[in-house]
Amino acid sequence: MGGTEMAERASRYLEQRGTTWHLRMRVPARYHAVEKRKLIKQSLYTDSKTEAEAIKGKIRQEILVELDRRLAGDKATADPSFDNVVALAKARGVAYRTSAELAAGPASELMGRLKKLMTEDPSATRQELISAELGGIDRPQVLISDLLREYEETNRARLSRKNDDQLRRWRNPYKRAINDLRSVLPNKQAVEITRQEALQLEAIYLDRVAEGEILAATANKRLGHLRTLVRAHCKRHQLIDNTSFENLSVSGGREPRKRKECSEAWILENILSPSLLSRTNSEIRDVLIIMSETGASPSEITGALPNHFRLNDPIPHIELRQEGRDLKNKYRVRDLVLTRPALEAARRHPEGFPRYRGKPGFSDAANGFLRENKLLPTPEHTVYSLRHAFQGRLRRAGGIDQFYQARMMGHDPKHVIKREVYGDDLTLEERMAVMNIIRLDTSEEERRKAKAALMGSTRS
C-alpha cells in the first residue's frame, strides 16, 4: 500500500469544516428504510485531527448501533422500545404522538395517519408501523433525578474528549441545580414541572441572594442549567416544550469578588524565590513558576501530555492541545513559549505533571500551602491571580497589539478588537518577542529590541 493511499485511508470518515473536525460517513444501503439521509455528518467538537482520529471510530460505531436498533423496529418480530418507535416515526416524516395525545389533538391529524396506514398496511399486520403512527408505546417516565443522565447520553459525542475530572466538574453544576429543584418539589416526571414550581424555586434563589448566601450570577446559572436540561428532554422525546424555566432571572445581592493581580515584586519574592517554594512538592512549585511566566491556568499546564513538552525545540514551548482533555474553548489552544525560569521548571518535569494531570486538587493544595505560610498578599488573592498578573503585564507593557494580548492569554481576539480576525495565529517567534517585553528578568535593552520587532505587526 502506497503512502498516499495509507494517508487517505487514515483520514477516512473525517471532514474539516472551518476549524472543527466532523465524522462523515455514508449510510449503508441496508439502513435506507429507516434513515433518509445518504450521508451522515456528526461534529466531533475538536479542532485537533489527532483527537478526531482517536474518537471517530467510537462515534461511528454508536451511529451504526443506533441504525441497527431503528432497523429492528422495522421488523414485525421486534420488541420495539420507545426510542425505536420514535426513530421509526421520525424516519417516516412524522412526529411521534402517543395514542392519548392523538386523541386529544386535531381529528385531521389522526385521520391522516389512519389513511396512510390503510394504504401501506391494509391488513394491519405490521405492528411496528401502527405503533409509530398511532402511538403504541407510552412515553417513558423520566424523573427529575434522571435528567442529567439523559442529557449526558444525548451529548456523549461532545463529552467524549473530557477526562474523568473534567466530567466530574462538568456534572457538578447540573447536580447542584437538580438538588435545588428537588428541595422544592418531589421527584416527579420532568415533563410535569409547572411554571408555579419554577417560580417557587426562583423565589428561593432571590431570598438566598438577598441574604448574601449566593451570588445572583450563581442563581441564574442554576436556573439556566435547569432550563437546558428540560429543553433537551423535550427535544429528545419530541414533546411540546416545557417552558417553566423560561425568562426567569435573579438580580441584586452582593457584588462578586474579583480576583486581584499579584504584583511583580510579590512574584519575584515569593514564586521565583527557590527557598520559599521548596517547602511544597516539586510539581506545585514548578507549575506556579510556569503560571507566573506564561499566564496559563493551572489545569492547562497540568493537563499537558508528555509529547506536548517541546523543550529541545529551537524555541522551547509547551503545546496546549485538545488531546487527553477538553480545553475551555478553541482559543485556549496555543503554545506557551518558555523563558527562564519557566524553562528551567519545565525541564525538571520533561514528562509533565502526572500527580495532577486529569485529577482534582492542584488549586486547593497550592492555595492551602500559600495561605498556611502567609505568602498570599491578601485573602482576595489565589493562585489564579498569577494569570491575572500576566494579563496586567501585557496590558501595561505598551507596544503589544490587542490581538497579541488576546492570543497570549487564550482569549477570542474578535471580542477584543471588535471585528473579524483573519490570517494565521502568532508564530513562536512572535510569542517569544512578546515574552521578551514582559518577562520579569528582561533587561531594558532586550525589551526595547523586542518592541521594535513587533512594531507594525498588527493583525487584520
Image (cartoon, rainbow, N blue to C red):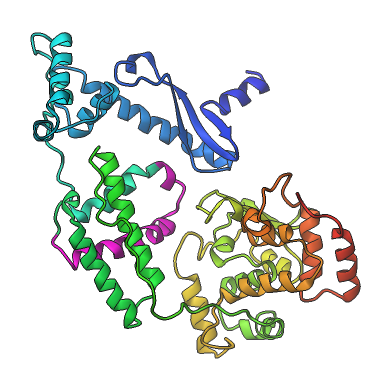
169 or 113: nearer the viewer: 113
Where residue 458 appears, x then y in whole percent? 80, 55
In-image side of 122 versus 18 (left or right): left
Res 226 → quadrant: bottom left
Where residue 204 appears, x then y in whole percent? 25, 73
Res 7 → quadrant: top right
Where residue 374 appears, x then y in whole percent? 55, 91
Q: Main secondary structure of the magenta part?
A: helix
Is residue 385 rendered magenta in the image? no
Relative to 332, say whether 232 is above or below.
above
In-image side of 409 versus 117 (left or right): right
Is residue 168 rendered magenta in the image? yes
From which residue to which does the magenta span run? 157-186
459 or 408: nearer the viewer: 459
Say if residue 319 shows up in the picture. Answer: no
221 or 13: nearer the viewer: 221
Position of the N terminus by quadrant: top right
Residue drawn where x is 46% and y is 75% of the image: 364
Res 269 → quadrant: bottom right
Say if residue 428 shows up in the picture. Answer: yes
